[in-house]
Image: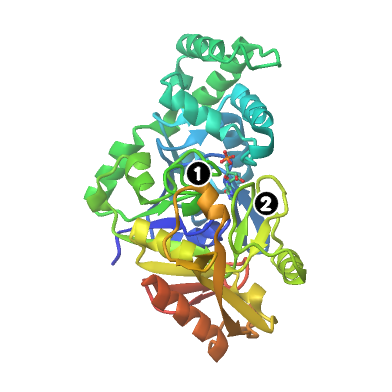
Amino acid sequence: MLKTLAVVGLQFGDEGKGKIIDYLASRFDIVARYQGGANAGHTVVVSGKTYKFHLIPSGILNKKICVLGNGMVIDPVELLKEMEMVEEYSPLKRILISERAHVVLPLHKEMDKIEEEIKSNSRVGTTGKGIGPAYQDKYARIGIRFGDLLDKNLLEKKIAINSKFKEMYLKENYDLKKIAEEYWRIGKKLKKNVVDTSAFLRKSIENGKSVLFEGAQGTHLDVDFGMYPYVTSSNTTIGGVITGLGIPPKYVGKVIGVMKAYTTKVGEGPFPTEIKDSTAKYILEKGNEYGTTTGRPRRIGWLDLNLVKYSVSLSGVNYIAISKIDILSGLEKVRVAYAYKIGNKIIRNLPSNIDDIYRLEPVYKEFDGWEFTELDVRKEIPKNMMNYIKFIEKFTGAKVRILSLGPARENTKILATI
Ligand code: IMP
């Protein structure tokens, strides 16, 4: 029996990780999230009810112990709201927050907006949740950590010092004492939940407990390996599991990558297989491709297997889960990019330089379409769809094990057990 499994996104986020994690969580004792913050949006549908998570691992709906790791940046006010949303799952008993996780302040959100304004035409298109500025403070060693919320005097002092660094930017007048008071009250409420999650996880694994490691965003938004500077501010790839939870690599068993059957992206930056035609509109509406966090319509493109292959190699992905393959159902032809071109030159490796990435033109293979929807979940996969899946496996070297055919748990097709 598999004891630990890490989940990573293989594209630009929004791959459907929330649903896959919810599906897998029943087999694990603990679900632990390793990076990001309320920029993420995981949608899970259970018994006809839709839950949208930004911070709490979706495993909470399986009544599992949920860990918010030190690699995260957490807005305490948003966390409390989310805990109230899932009150019936006893979150106070089940959620553990790393005392080392960093805290998002209201000032971070304002800075996020100001930084985007300064960047103007080269803005990243962030979610506006203060993620970048909170990570900046972490690395500048002026961040507030969750453990700091437990001591009111210390918290006031730290927030005052932190805000001094931002005086030249900020337009709003913050009542720093009020922020400290509000955050301290949340800290007091969550006192028993704020622990050394790294020690907890190591001990749990040593004692035979099973853990699912939950990632947010996707490989091509990774601050080191994504399409920099159009990235988020954390490591969304496998290294993030180790540093974001404080566990040794030997405790990471297998890795499952989640990909959408096509590609979507929110925010700015290059997107080699982007399409803007009637097929894009069809996918946008049929796939309800609007951001969970910001409501922005997502950019749509054909499946870019160059990106997926890179992600598989970078994070050592063993298995793949494909989401939304039902959305492509009904199209006459479906395209997949398996190389790029710059002029007449074939490019097989993704360049690191953003200007070079902008110049890439995808080289496509075309597949005949299929009809297969959530109603067919128990039926045999049609030949054309199987060709698509086999091509993904052959090209990336990872095994496709799960297909998602709709948002609900029961619309999941398992090709082979993990
Ligand atoms: P930030 O993480 O809010 O700083 O945004 C940086 C970039 O990552 C922007 O292009 C966002 O649209 C993108 N991004 C952040 N979180 C997600 C996510 O959960 N799904 C998809 N894109 C995201």
Residue 291, which numbered label? 2
Q: Amino acid at mark 2?
A: Gly
Q: Residue at the spot x=43%, y=62% of the render?
A: 257
Q: Residue at x 63, y 64 (%)?
A: 301
Residue sitting at 51 percent across and 15 percent down? 162
Tell me the residue that label 1 is attached to.
228
Vertical placement of residue 142 versus 249, above or below: above
Mark 1 neighbour density, 10 Å: few (under 14) some (14–19) many (20 or more): some
Label 2 CB, ligand 1: below 8 Å?
yes
Q: Amino acid at mark 1?
A: Tyr
Residue 351 image point, x, y percent: 45, 54
Which of the pair 124/381 is nearer the observer?
124
Instruction: Report how far apart the C-alphas of labels 2 and 1 lie in the structure.
Output: 21 Å
Evaluate if marks 2 and 1 touch, with contact meaning CB atoms under 8 Å apart: no
Residue 247: percent from the left, percent from the top? 28, 43
Is any atom of residue 103 visible in this view? no
Q: Which mark is residue 417?
A: none
The answer to which of 89 and 40 lies nearer the viewer is: 40
Q: Label 2: few (<14), some or many (≥20) within 10 Å?
A: some
Visible residue check, residue 413:
yes
Q: Give the mark nearest the N terminus, 2 or 1.
A: 1
Towards the viewer: 281 or 247: 281
Nearest the viewer among 348 and 58 is 348
